[in-house]
Image (cartoon, rainbow, N blue to C red):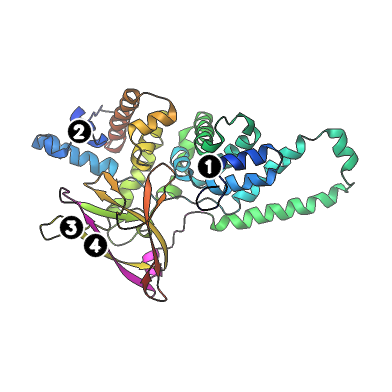
Amino acid sequence: MDHSGAPSDGSVVRAVLSGDVDQFSVLVRRYRDRYARYATQMLGSIDAAEDAVQDAMVRAYTHLAQCREPDNFAGWFFLILRNRCFAERRRTRWESDLENIGEVAAPEQTESALERSELVEGLQRALQRLTAEQREVFVLKHVEGLSYEEIAGRVSTSVAALKMRMHRAYDRLRELLEAP
Amino acid sequence: MKNREWNNQVKQVLDGDRELESLSPELRREAEAARRLLLEAIDRRPVTLSAALEARIMARVRGRATARWPRAWRWLSAPTIPRWAMLVPVAAAALFVVFSRGGQQIDRQPQAQAGQRDSVYVRFELYAPRASRVALAGTFNRWDTASAPLVRVGKDGMWTVTLALPSGQHQYGFIVDGRNWVPDPAAPTVDDGFGRRNSVVSVNTINGRIL
């Protein structure tokens, strides 16, 4: 239990592994939305993100015995979801996702927000044309606000490699956004 | 397509590794353009998935748990149900999924309009003497980093903005100089799921109080 009285991830994982399947719903409630924005940005639509989170959760349950650090279920689940997002990107062509971008990108048209909404939408479209690795580093750093060091820890890559990936993403985005 | 590459110093500014002020005027203009094009156009609105998601996941999880039982035991213990009768709960579940998906996406109703009558003015303050600009982004403005800039008050480094917020709990943060996300030191915080903290303000419009 933590200070709020809620069971820790570790104790929930152990309860599920000992046969109390319904306890898995605690983890589902706890983490279903935590990485939703990441998945949405990676896949280009909320529907695709929802499918990915659902599959990742079921996969986490199926392989729960392989979770070496039950108290770090969140980190382990993130890696499963990340793999799912990358697999999905390999499976589908980016063009098919562009039809769904408006769902992610279209903010409310308030006051003089039209110009900003066009910029937001343009960036969303351009992000979907990066490689999955470039898009991920951009999303984790600039959308989720992680530092390069934090990203490197999560995805097991060096900071130098991440920066190189990001700098290529900057150039590619410029190419896409400033194209006539 | 013409190859367009940002100057390396501009990329370092985008990374947060270099101050804008350290650049030459020409590069500074390029860096400001890069920020506008890339960083200020980022959609940081939180995403909430369908309310029915948990039920769907748990249905699949329970199905897998059942599948682990020995087939012979299931055959012996399962009640005999006509095939047509099994279609009833399946159809009901499908209808539930179809109709529940209508409201699953991000709430697109403009919150400011909805709260015009029942809102409370909340004053946000941040002490940031070295900042050249500060903005407020949160669930109440869809994490828009441009819609709620703070104004510097006097010369002591205090920045402030007052917003009308509808009743409810709101998460927010300050953006200093367009790139540094800073939680409100005067408010409680919650984990944003990625190791950072969002500040939280709860507004009770019935009593006109901030909780």
Q: Are marks 1 and 2 in contact (CB under 8 Å)?
A: no
Establish whether labels 4 and 1 are both on one chain: no
- Kindly report which numbered mark, 1 or 2, lies closer to the viewer in this rendering: 2
Position above or below: B147 against A178: below
The disc at residue B10 is 2
Circle 4: residue type: Val
Say which element carries label 2: helix
Q: Chain of mark 3?
A: B
Circle 3: residue type: Met
Residue indicated by mark 3: B158
Establish whether labels 1 and 2 are both on one chain: no
Left or right placement of residue B152 versus residue B123 in this view = left
Q: How crowded is the residue under tag 1: few (<14 C-alpha within 10 Å), some, or many (20+)? A: some
Say which element carries label 3: strand
Q: Chain of mark 2?
A: B
Say which element carries label 1: helix
Say which element carries label 4: strand
Q: Residue at x 30, y 58 (%)?
A: B186
Between the C-alphas of marks 3 and 1, the distance is: 43 Å
**Residue B40 colored in magenta in the image:** no
Between the C-alphas of marks 2 and 4, the distance is: 30 Å
**Which residues are the magenta region?**
B105-133
Q: Are marks 4 and 1 in contact (CB under 8 Å)?
A: no
Between the C-alphas of marks 2 and 3, the distance is: 29 Å
Residue indicated by mark 4: B161
Q: Position of residue B174 (x, y in %)?
A: 28, 52
Q: Residue at x 88, y 48 (%)?
A: B82
Residue indicated by mark 1: A48
